[in-house]
Amino acid sequence: MSINSMDDISIRIKENYKWIYTYDYAPDSVWDEWRSEVADYAWIQEEAGAVTERLQEDLPCYILLSDSHYVINGTWDDTMKSMMALSERITGSKKASIVGIIHLGDLTDGLLPLEKTRQFESRCIQDMQSLNVPLYIVPGNHDYNYFRGNPEVKYPDRPQYYVDFEDMHLRMLFIDSFDPREAVRYGFTEYCIHWLDAALNMMPDDYKAIIFSHVTPLVRLQAWAKDIRNRQHLIEVLNKHAEKILTFINGHNHCDHLFNDLNNGQFPIISINCAKCEYFLEHKPEGAVVPERRLGDRTQESFDIMQVDVKKRKIYFTRFGAGSDRYVENHKAYWV
């Protein structure tokens, strides 16, 4: 029997339900090995081929993923196999090339001693760097190693930065969105907002911007916090520079979400699904799309290839694994 048959998938779901229906790995949990000793990874190559066929020609490719939440015995190794297979397939097709990886935060769960957390983070970072393209990361709330009262909290070395792509006339801005020292932990520092304002002010006139953050700027676009610190100030800056911005992209929500109802009407806010293999419908904003996940086939993975056409103000998100393709056009985001 093929390991990808529906009967086998049903067996895997029953045996490993806790893998895809939980979002909190307790440190003292015991997790049985879920991979078969004769695991067939043909689905990775098949999905890499299918994704490559759907790409736009002659536009650079960025691997875009979020919330991988690395754990021992998790699915990160397969995520890396998938990204490597996709990179090789795209390079071989000569349609485009991968020029960077963007990770929107929560590399790990942030529940362990700091030394162990650093080991896990280094593992993930080194794995992604092995694709030999630049890696851009925004810190997620779990990356602070803060949860379950963990006393060994860590803070990012580069909470905000930007990168210019001169040939594309594109500036990508990466900002922080969490601070456990604050009464309202989720949100944006005054410094970060002033920095963002200055970075957009100084941007060349013929450039456009994409802003990346772990957390969305609007309370209603997430379900974990009752407030987002300095959200109004941030929205004022976003509105001020709205004509320069192509989109605001965040992770954190563990779902796909397209929001086109900003008052400025110039760009959408887009949430990216979690790379970790999980499937639960709780704690999601209204309008969220949560693609079903299964272990052992293409839906185990969920990340994007992002392609940007600055001249046409278009962005393409081609999904590897669970979920749908999306695109941005005429200042709005759409499902394919």
Image (cartoon, rainbow, N blue to C red):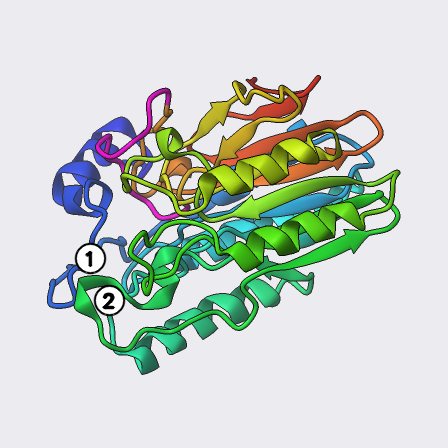
Mark nearest the camera among 1 and 2 is: 2
Q: Is residue 286 magenta?
A: yes
Tag 1 and tag 2, C-beta contact below 8 Å: yes
Q: Amino acid at mark 2?
A: Leu
Q: Which residue is mark 2?
A: 111
Q: Amino acid at mark 1?
A: Tyr
| Closer to us: 73 or 149 | 149
The tally of labels here is 2
Q: Which residue is mark 1?
A: 25
Q: Secondary structure at mark 2?
A: loop
Residue 181 in the image: above or below residue 98: below
Picture quarter containing residue 216?
Answer: top left
Q: Quadrant of the C terminus?
A: top right
Q: Quadrant of the N terminus?
A: top left
Q: Is residue 330 left or right of residue 64?
A: right
Q: Secondary structure at mark 1?
A: loop
Q: Is residue 285 visible?
A: yes
Q: Is residue 333 left or right of residue 223?
A: right
Q: Residue at x 33, y 45 (%)?
A: 277
Q: Residue at x 57, y 68 (%)?
A: 158
Which region of the structure is painted magenta?
275-287
Q: Is residue 104 magenta?
A: no
Q: Is residue 277 left or right of residue 331?
A: left
